[in-house]
Amino acid sequence: MDPLDVWPFPALRVTSGDLELRYLDDDLLLQAALLAADGVHAADAMPFTVPWTRGTPAEVATSVLRYQWSRRAELSPERWVLELAVLRGGELVGLQGAQATEFRVTRQAETGSWLGLRFQGQGIGTRMRRLILHLLFEGLGAERATTTAFADNARSNGVTRRVGYRENGRDVLPREGAAAESIRYVLTRDAWAADPDRPEVALDGVAAVRRHLGVPD
């Protein structure tokens, strides 16, 4: 039996120019953990609902490993979290993920991501979001993509609006012991297709991933 028949994700590639999304195998996962340990945001900021970036560098790296290993173990057609390494010119710069519950029914997925601090402000965030959206809409047949960001996370909100999402409500969430406003966004298939700046994207290994996730053709 071909190992990819059992676990097809290592063959998945989403590529545009020098940027690539690739399955997070153990080698890339260790690189991602060490990158996160070097810093993901300023010390006085917290862009995440779960403050996994707090702690010593070793604690942050360990948190990344444990989280990612747990997501692999729980991946199923009913509920999945697909985390992909973001590589620019072959160098790992961050992670881009998508998650869904009963995607084969709802055709809706939520995106989330992070970049190493030293790679921020270079336009990579916008590019990697467009790549994961191409995978969701073109590769997996999504009808809607959602995302959230705290109101004070200017870069994340900027990327989200730039690629065509519309605001879909606001919530007040606890963040490190204080209330913080979080913005919900939604992007429809039609809005994604109308984006004039969508790049040329190559998809590889998607058909087997669809079958594994129970998504009909």
Image (spheres, rainbow, N blue to C red):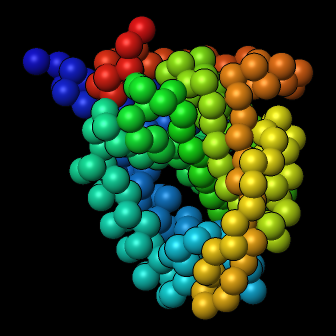
Residue at point 38%, 20% (across, down)? 215
Q: Residue at x 60, y 24 (%)?
A: 143
Residue 165 x %, y %? 78, 39
Who's the residue at 69% across and 66% down the image? 171
Quarter of the image for residue 189 reads top right
Q: Quadrant of the N terminus?
A: top left
Left or right, 122 with respect to 39, comes to right
User: Which residue in the rendered view is the most extreme toward the left?
Assistant: 1
Return the x and y of residue 169 as percentages of the image width and height.
Answer: 75, 54
Where residue 115 sits, quadrant-wise, is bottom right
Point out residue 136 in the picture as x, y percentages from the top left corner. 56, 28
| Rendered view: 184 above or below 144 | below
Q: Can you name the residue that lies furthest to the bottom here?
A: 177
Q: How many marks?
A: 0
Rendered view: 145 above or below 196 = below
Report if residue 207 is visible in the image.
yes
- Who is closer to the viewer here, 138 or 35? 138
Q: Is residue 213 above or below residue 174?
A: above
Q: Residue 63's quadrant in the figure?
A: bottom left
